Image (spheres, rainbow, N blue to C red):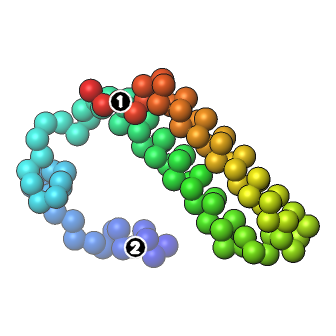
């Protein structure tokens, strides 16, 4: 009810200047509906995937000394992370060979 009342009693005076998109204090060039190459999205998704994978290493590094107490042992913990890094490296090489990291 409060949202409806504030909408009813608000003072809204839309103008052409207020309706324009605001982009870093500069006047917009071209249309906001412009198409972008898929490369932009692909690079963004790859960055997020590899960034999240690296973030998964942080808790492992923090708890590395306690992993020996859980029965894994230091060698088991290192082997576990080595397998993780190898899987990550295989994904990186696959993306690299497919040409997803090349910018033209």
- Could you tell me which secondary element the residue under label 2 belongs to? helix
In the drawing, what numbered circle is on residue 9?
Answer: none
Q: Position of residue 44 (x, y in %)?
A: 42, 43
The image quadrant that residue 74 belongs to is bottom right
Q: In this view, does 78 lie above or below 50?
A: below
Q: Nearer the viewer, residue 11 or 88?
A: 88
Residue bearing mark 2: 5
Q: In this view, does 31 lie above or below 24?
A: above
Q: Where is residue 58 in the image (x, y as percent from the top left)?
A: 61, 66
Cα–Cα span, label 2 and label 1: 54 Å
- Could you tell me which secondary element the residue under label 1 belongs to? loop
Q: Where is residue 68 in the image (x, y as percent from the top left)?
A: 83, 70
Task: Please tell me which residue is depicted at 66% across the width and 73% down the height of the picture.
Answer: 62
Instruction: Determine whether, in the image, residue 50 is placed left or right of residue 88.
Output: left
Instruction: Determine whether, in the image, residue 52 is placed left or right of residue 70.
Output: left
Q: Residues within 10 Å of mark 2 (few under 14, many from 20)?
A: few
The image quadrant that residue 30 belongs to is top left
Q: Nearer the viewer, residue 77 or 101?
A: 77
Q: Can residue 25 be seen in this view?
A: yes
Q: Nearer the viewer, residue 26 or 69?
A: 69
Q: Which of marks 2 and 1 is nearer the N terminus?
A: 2
Q: How many labels does the image show?
A: 2
Task: Please tell me which residue is depicted at 69% across the width and 65% down the height of the picture.
Answer: 60
Q: Residue furthest front?
A: 75
Task: Please tell me which residue is depicted at 41% across the width and 39% down the height of the picture.
Answer: 43
Instruction: Determine whether, in the image, residue 36 is placed left or right of residue 61.
Output: left
């Amino acid at each position: 009810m409060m949202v409806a009342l504030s909408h009813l009693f608000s003072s809204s005076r839309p103008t052409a200047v207020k309706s324009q998109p605001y982009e870093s204090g500069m006047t917009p060039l071209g249309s906001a509906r412009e198409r972008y190459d898929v490369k932009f999205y692909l690079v963004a998704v790859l960055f997020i995937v590899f960034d999240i994978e690296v973030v998964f290493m942080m808790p492992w590094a923090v708890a590395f000394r306690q992993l020996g107490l859980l029965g894994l042992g230091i060698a088991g913990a290192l082997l576990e992370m080595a397998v993780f890094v190898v899987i990550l490296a295989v994904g990186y090489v696959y993306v690299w060979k497919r040409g997803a990291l090349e910018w033209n």
